[in-house]
Image (cartoon, grey):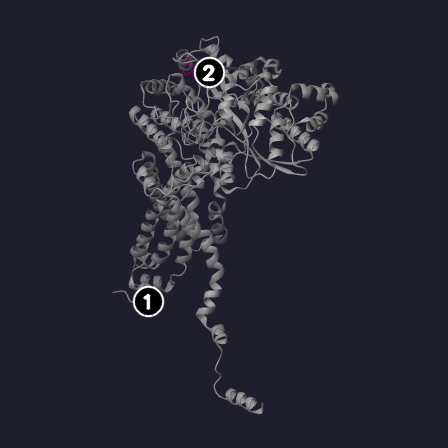
Amino acid sequence: MADAALGRAGSMAALPDRSLWARLKSNREWLGAWFMMPTAILLLLFLAYPLVKGIWMSFTDARIGRGGAFVGLENYEWLWDDDVFWLSVFNTLLYTFIASVIKFGIGLYLALLLNRHIPFKAIIRSIILIPFVVPTVLSAIAFWWIFDSQFSIISWSLRHMGLIDTNINFLGDQSWARTCVIFVNIWRGVPFIAITLLAGLQTVSPSLYEAATIDGASPWQNFRHITFPLLTPIIAVVMTFSVLFTFTDFQLIWAMTRGGPVNATHLMATLSYQRGILSGTLGEGAAIATAMVPFLMAAIALSWFGLQRRKWQHGGSDA
Amino acid sequence: MSHFDRRTLIKGGAALGLAGATNLLDFAKAWAQASPFKPEPNSTLNVLRWKRFVEAEDAAFMKMVDAFAKATGTKVNISNESFDDIQPKASVAANTGQGPDMVWGLYSFPFLFPEKCIEVTDVADYLGKKYGGWVKTAEAYGKYKDKWIAIPVAFNGGYINYRISAVKKAGFDKVPADTAGFLELCKALKKNNTPCGFALGHATGDGNSWAHWALWSHGGNLVDKNEKVVIDSPETMKALEYVKQLYETFIPGTAAWNDSNNNKAFLAGELYLTGNGISIYAAAKVDPSKKEIAQDMDHALWPVGPVGKPTEFQLAFPILAFKYSKVPNACKAFMAFMLEAENYNPWLEGAQGYLTHPLNAYDSNPVWTADPKNTVFREASKRTLAAGGESPVTERTAAALADFVVVDMFASYCTGAADAKTAVRNAERAAKRIFRA
């Protein structure tokens, strides 16, 4: 027994040979994996599983109330010839493109304005955020009333000012309806872009501007050569988010027009809901929703390859 | 289950003093004793219904629920959802196997998932025998392959609502009974700046009902009785032309209307003729500021078209019970209880004409004659065709209605989004897809 004790003491005097468990306990990768596990489970359950299930459903003829059999690409083949589907694709692209461009323009301008030293800066910045913070459905319903064909406050005011004779058919006319939903989307989305770009602007070092001014640069040259290039990573991020959310917009359209009039404001998301849930043809609804994925990936690829590849953004030096 | 018929009921009723029972609770208790449908003891029943349009109807309904609960000892929870949300919620419940025990919804939604509904042939037979038989369309809404899967509790009658003074000013004594005359009336209304308007947006009730009336009255049909798609026909073209001419007389904005827009516009005095249930009249009667409108308005039957017979599309409100329910007998008892005279009569009166009965015995309910403006609605369950027109009511009919195939066909032609051939072709394509074997 004394030998064993001596042997143990001897071995402890030498470099300790740690057990597997002890080594694992301090191994960063092992620990990292375990720390990630809860989030991974949540993501798998609530993101990955529904996504994969949805894509699977698009290959079946599932209906509400009963499962479906595998039908391959039949849903997609049918959608390929469906006028209403292509109209919804067109509407979605139009809506996303116009709304995003205008949101970016106004958002950037607002951010530049708010970057200056103006009185009540903090309060103004908070007020600017309100359209984004108000629940979408509430603002959509409010605008639904503002644009109502019979009871619109805009029509009423213009009529009382003598500028028009009859009410404007805001939501009953196809072009007007599209304009209205795009307008509401812009109203709601500008603050997000403005505040994020503002944050980006504040990271630009003022010494750069000072140096440029000393060299005689005009405000436009300041913007073009200093502000904009340094902002591109932020722009990439915020526009990616904005385009993604605008493309998949549902609540605003549904609350305002339900996709009408005559499907003129149907986006792919709203059409997918109408076909899948209201009409009961889950497989077809899933196919429409899955058809959104290529467009979204293209948007992400555009933002990544177009705006993020300058070497200096990755630590290299600009050629 | 022992043999139960009129004699047993009268004997039992007499024994329990039913003849003299004016108290609803007393009746309920007596009924609970005598009824062949006995709820499970100490059960809880969850019922989902559409949010009421007429306050008094809801009050009468809750009174009945209360009496049922007290008499049978079953706890009843009622949840209300807006009209348009009932079908998605019921669909999700059917798909997931959990949710309310019973859903009282619209149209033919039981046919979206017929296999998930409890068979209620016994309840239907009991009620039919006791109350003079079901109207024909009620069977179409309740039966799936010769078995009753839902009880059509009531029809929601929708008829022409019009301003009497506007129609007189247009040179007519009453709303014409034929479609050609009706078009003339609408043209004259437009000329006098008292326009009409019908929903061409995705209005589940108003939109579908008038669009199908327009199609059917000219002999057009989405599918024939064998579910073959027959929308591409000269009759459909005639219907399209008719509706286009009507559209020219409409107030602007109808292409975006849902079910509530015409109510609001009529009550605001901007709209002078439309198709709607009795909810406009009911709202005008209770609002003192709308008294003038209530006095100046009346209701008329839908005109008859070239086919020569009534081709109305009135909505039915069927109630179904899900197979996953743990209290199927309570469900059946509740269904039977709803349509018993002691409940149904006051309920019809509380609804003030908003609901029309599917059982012939209720023709004599005083609500139809107390106010002459209500009488027209008594005919709703008899003059209507079922949701599929000629074809049986199935999940495919329900899908076509929910996708607004017919409404969109008219809307796209009227607004100029498509020419007639394209509009029909799109409708045909959508229908063929839905009705494929």
- Residue ID for mark 1: A315
Where residue A53 sits in the image (x, y, percent)?
41, 48
Q: Is B301 or A166 nearer to us in this picture?
A: B301
Which quarter of the rendering shows the N terminus of chain B?
top right
Residue, disc 2: B302
Among the 4 quarters of the image, the one containing residue B361? top right
Q: Secondary structure at mark 1?
A: loop
**Label 2: chain letter:** B
Find residue B433 and name its label. Answer: none
Residue B54 visible in the picture = yes
A239 left or right of B151 in image? left
Disc 2 versus disc 1: distance between alpha carbons? 76 Å
The span shown in magenta is B188-195
Please say if B246 is above or below A69. Answer: above
Q: Residues within 10 Å of mark 2 (few under 14, many from 20)?
A: many
Q: Mark 2 or mark 1: which is in front? A: 2
Is residue A265 in the magenta section? Answer: no
- Looking at the rendered structure, the kind of residue marked 1 is Gly
Q: Residue at x 45, y 8 (%)?
A: B171
Residue at the far front: name it: B2
Q: Position of residue B143 (x, y in %)?
A: 50, 26
- Determine whether, in the image, residue B353 is placed left or right of residue A187: right
Left or right: A297, with B103 as reference point: left
- From the viewer's perspective, tell me whether residue B53 is left or right of residue B401: right
Read off the chain for label 1: A
- The secondary structure type at the circle numbered 2 is loop
Instruction: Point out residue A226 in the picture as x, y percentages from the top left corner.
Output: 32, 59
The answer to whether one can see residue A218 in this image is no
Residue B16, position as x, y percentages in the image? 74, 23
The one nearer the camera, B342 or A35, is: B342
> Which residue is more in the foreground, B57 or A193?
B57
Q: Which amino acid, by three-letter code, is at mark 2? A: Trp
